[in-house]
Image: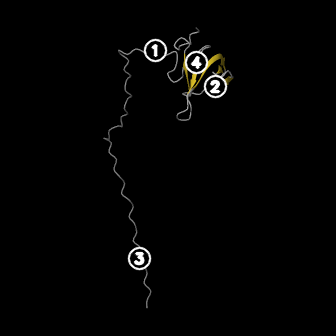
Amino acid sequence: MPSKKKTVAKKKPAAKKKTSTSMKPVTTMKPAAKKTAGKKPAAKKTTSSSAPAPARKGDMIVIDSSKVGSPAREGEVLEVIQGQISVSYRVQWPDGHQSLIAPGLGSARVVPASARQRPTLS
């Protein structure tokens, strides 16, 4: 049997695309102008809303219990110690002992001395 040769079709070169000289240039969008008419700058607050007001000497600090049904701990602030990062308090508890605490956000609340009722001595 005679051997058959495979014929390979030659590819034609791709036709060049015609470029028209009447193409529109690409336009870029300008940023919108800021509207400032009629608006006043907001006043800066002296204290942030997330940070509680620090306690003062004589205030009561209340620490809620982590266990359900247990009473909260209440103590009187004897001293305020300002650190570089946080504030610590020397607190005297009702049973007489003292401790140094640095409560985190939301773990303690402060009752000002002017707002709490003091027991009357009779």
Spatial separation of the CA atoms under disc 1 and disc 2:
31 Å
Spatial separation of the CA atoms under disc 2 and disc 4:
14 Å
Looking at the rendering, in which quadrant would you find the C terminus? top right
* Mark found first going from the N terminus, 3 or 4: 3
* Mark found first going from the N terminus, 2 or 4: 4
* Mark found first going from the N terminus, 2 or 3: 3
Spatial separation of the CA atoms under disc 1 and disc 3:
85 Å
Q: Looking at the image, which residue is at 60% across and 14% down? A: 56
Q: Looking at the image, which residue is at 36% across and 57% down? A: 15
Spatial separation of the CA atoms under disc 4 and disc 1:
32 Å
Badge 4 marks a residue whose secondary structure is strand
The answer to the question of whether label 2 and label 3 lie on touching residues, with beta carbons closer than 8 A, is no
Return the residue at label 1.
43
Task: Using residue 54 as the reference point, say whether residue 35 is left or right of it.
Answer: left
Q: Give neighbour class at mark 2: few <14, some 14-19, many 20+ (Cα, 10 Å).
A: few
* Mark found first going from the N terminus, 4 or 1: 1
Mark 2 or 3: the one toward you: 2
Q: Is 27 placed above or below 39 here?
A: below
Return the residue at label 4.
60
Spatial separation of the CA atoms under disc 2 and disc 3:
89 Å
**Which residue is situated farthest in the top direction here?**
122
**Where residue 71 sits in the image (x, y, percent)?**
55, 29
* Mark found first going from the N terminus, 1 or 2: 1
Q: How is the image coloured?
A: secondary structure
Q: Give neighbour class at mark 3: few <14, some 14-19, many 20+ (Cα, 10 Å).
A: few
Q: Looking at the image, which residue is at 59% across and 28% down? A: 104
The kind of residue tagged 3 is Thr
Return the residue at label 3.
7
**Where residue 87 sits in the image (x, y, percent)?**
63, 21
* Mark found first going from the N terminus, 1 or 3: 3
As drawn, the label of residue 102 is: 2
